[in-house]
Image (cartoon, helix red, strand yellow):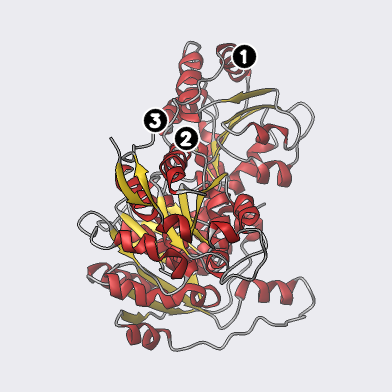
Amino acid sequence: MTARMTGGEAVVDALKANGVETLYAIPGIQLDHLFNALHGVQNWLTIVNARHEQGVAYMALGHAQSTGEPGVYVCVPGPGFLNTAAALSTAYAVRAPVLALIGQIASTAIGVGGGELHELPDQTAIVKGLTRWNGIARTPEEIPALMETAFAKLKAGIAPVAVELPADVLKAAAELPPARPAVAAPPRAPIPHAVTRAAALLAQAKAPLIVVGSGAYGGEAALTRLAEHLEAPVVAHLQGRGVLPSTHPLAVGFAEGQKLWAEADVVLAIGTRFHEARRNWGERAGLRVIRVDTDPAQFSRGLPPEIAMEADAPLTLATLGEAVAAGPAKSGRAETIAALKTEIAQAFATRLAPQMAYVRALRTVLPADARIVADYTQIGYVSTAAFDVAAPRLLLTPGYQGTLGFAYATALGAKSANPEVPVVALCGDGGFLFTGNELATAVQHGIAAIGVVFVDGAYGNVRRMQEELYGGKVVATGLTNPDFVRYAESFGARARRAEGPEAFAAALEWAMAETGPTLIEVPVATFPDPWDLLEP
């Protein structure tokens, strides 16, 4: 059964069919007929409009990272789309299920080069380079299938994705079928003989090591059983943190991982690019590697693994765990791993004492299910390694993209998607003002995220490098800041200044009790260099 609808109405129909309840969007002339279709649907769809296109894209990123569900944003073509590129590239880096609905000039004008408003020489080529799947609707009849495919790709872990929507296609009407909810293909099971070989290799290992990334999300219980049976430490970095809770005796970070790597004889890498470990610690002769990933391209990066399984990580963990459990459990490494964890914890506590005082305040005050969004700033860096994480999706980072300034707007998306838990953005004064204008959005929509700005008057990490690595060649790293408390209050947010870790802890307690958006300004001095502990 069909109904006559515009292309814009077909897009909205697809959003509803796929359970989208929040849309992060900024209108513009090429999107008029999409926004006409959005009028009157607020009984089921919340539309969060922001003050900059990067704001809506980062909010979609935070929504997606913190829930695993699609975060959808809308922007006009050309400069509007380019303003979202940093967030879209970050979604690519962390494989966040973001759907970008990108406006386009009229379909008849694409490729002509006539200088249409917001025209790019080849917008589709740029979209393709920042996504793992993209499509463009040339007629309204194409929209239902394109939207269904986009959502199916996200369900299958192929992310981010984008659909370009030309202005005339959004306006045109046609007889269209009702949108259908996307159905993902069933997860790919590992080949049985590969599981048998991997289980045998792990059973023979004297010092097995497991490395996990975000591809292992959903396999937490199976990973725990496998690691405990093998008594194998589990290394997690950035996106992988929380797959095994930080407090588990076998959960280790990169500082411990470097030392364990030297003695490891078999490494199982699951749902991870495995790049940092290989690059920083080397692929030595005799090290036997098993890799599990849905992306076979990962297997060709670095030395080829001895066993490569192109398969769903949670399903493979469960199958591999059953195979390994048929043999005797390993023992004898618990004391060594515990001693190493204690040694590294003491190194963090003594060598990075100023940062760790704030990290401890965060962990003491915040509930276990709070979301932390760690920007590229001193406390953010250390939090990615030293903040205890109980489960996946609780610590959000930009991954290898390192997108300075992403945290505040990303936190707004995470908070709008998780209104029942605290969400804290850890920002520096260098990065905060990249998206600090979205305080206006937080106030307008009542998004009660907690922003924290650590203020040292500089791009502090770069300045320290200039001073310590380059003979004091300090240039272009000093900052002139506003009074961040008054800045936040000017938007209608509540704000406080906290001098020192104890005052910071008290300010966090205050912020969690507030019902609207809050900001905490924390003046700090120069912090000690953390990098030989964070990425040894």
Q: Is residue 491 left or right of residue 120?
A: left
Q: Sequence order check: which comes first, mark 1 or mark 3? A: 1
Disc 1: which residue: 197
**Element class at badge 1:** helix
Q: Sequence order check: which comes first, mark 2 or mark 3? A: 2
Farthest residue, direction left: 43
Determine which of the numbered discs, if any, sits on residue 156 in the image: 2
Query: Of the residues tagged 2 and 3, which is closer to the observer?
Result: 2
Q: Is residue 36 above or below residue 497?
A: above
Residue at image point 70% right, 27% down: 305
Mark 2–mark 3 Cα distance, whole angstroms, equals 21 Å
Residue 68 location (% of width, % of height):
40, 45
Q: Sequence order check: which comes first, mark 2 or mark 1? A: 2
Return the residue nearer the eye: 336 or 509.
509
Q: Is residue 434 above or below residue 126?
A: below
Residue 42 location (% of width, % of height):
23, 60
Q: Is residue 388 visible?
A: no
Q: Is residue 475 left or right of residue 309?
A: right
**Element class at badge 3:** helix
Three-letter amino acid code at the position of disc 3 = Ala
Mark 2–mark 1 Cα distance, whole angstroms, equals 27 Å
Three-letter amino acid code at the position of disc 2 = Ala
Instruction: Please identify the quarter of the rendering in which residue 25 is found.
Output: bottom left
**Element class at badge 2:** loop
Residues tagged 1 and 3 counted as in contact (Cβ below 8 A):
no
Mark 1–mark 3 Cα distance, whole angstroms, equals 22 Å
Disc 3: which residue: 221
